[in-house]
Image (cartoon, rainbow, N blue to C red):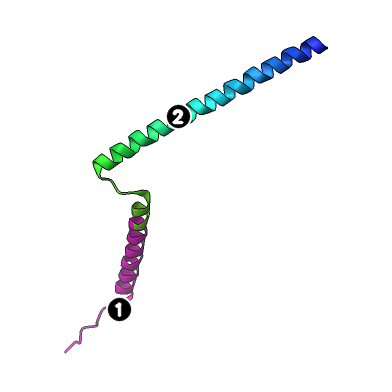
Amino acid sequence: MSKSKFIIDKFAKLFEQSLISYKDLSSEITNILRSQRDDIVFKMKLTSKEETAILLQRIEKIEKKIEKLEKKRNKKNPKKVKKY
């Protein structure tokens, strides 16, 4: 029993160390990719997420106003022409 426990402990330590090194490696890769993405976005002069969200909200407001105006225009009764 003591030998199996010893082997299990060794495997657990090895597994734990590999997970830690994998997490470090994956976090490094994601950091590198994010910095590359940011450089590309900066060079292309694209808008940030906040600016895009603000622009989308403005567009939605304008679309709602247009719909209201179209509904008002369609609701108006056409003027009747007087017959002589």
Question: Residue 76: where, in percent of width, then height?
Answer: 30, 77
Magenta highlight range: 55-84
The secondary element bearing badge 2 is classed as helix
Q: Which residue is mark 1?
A: 77
User: Mostly what secondary structure, the magenta segment?
Assistant: helix
Which residue type does callout 1 highlight?
Asn
Question: Residue 26: where, in percent of width, then height?
Answer: 48, 28
Q: Quadrant of residue 80?
A: bottom left
Q: Point out the image quarter for the N terminus.
A: top right
The secondary element bearing badge 1 is classed as loop
Q: Which residue is mark 2?
A: 28
Q: Estimate the spatial distance between the alpha carbons at disc 1 and disc 2, rounded to whole Å.
A: 67 Å
Give the vertical position of 34 relative to 61 (above or below). above
Q: Quick check: 2 left or right of 69?
A: right
Contact flag, marks 1 and 2 (Cβ < 8 Å): no
Q: Quick check: 2 left or right of 56?
A: right
- Say which of 43 and 82 sits in front: 43
Please name the residue shown 20% across and 87% down the image. 82
Please name the residue shown 77% across and 12% down the image. 4
Residue 80: say if magenta: yes
Please name the residue shown 63% across and 23% down the image. 16
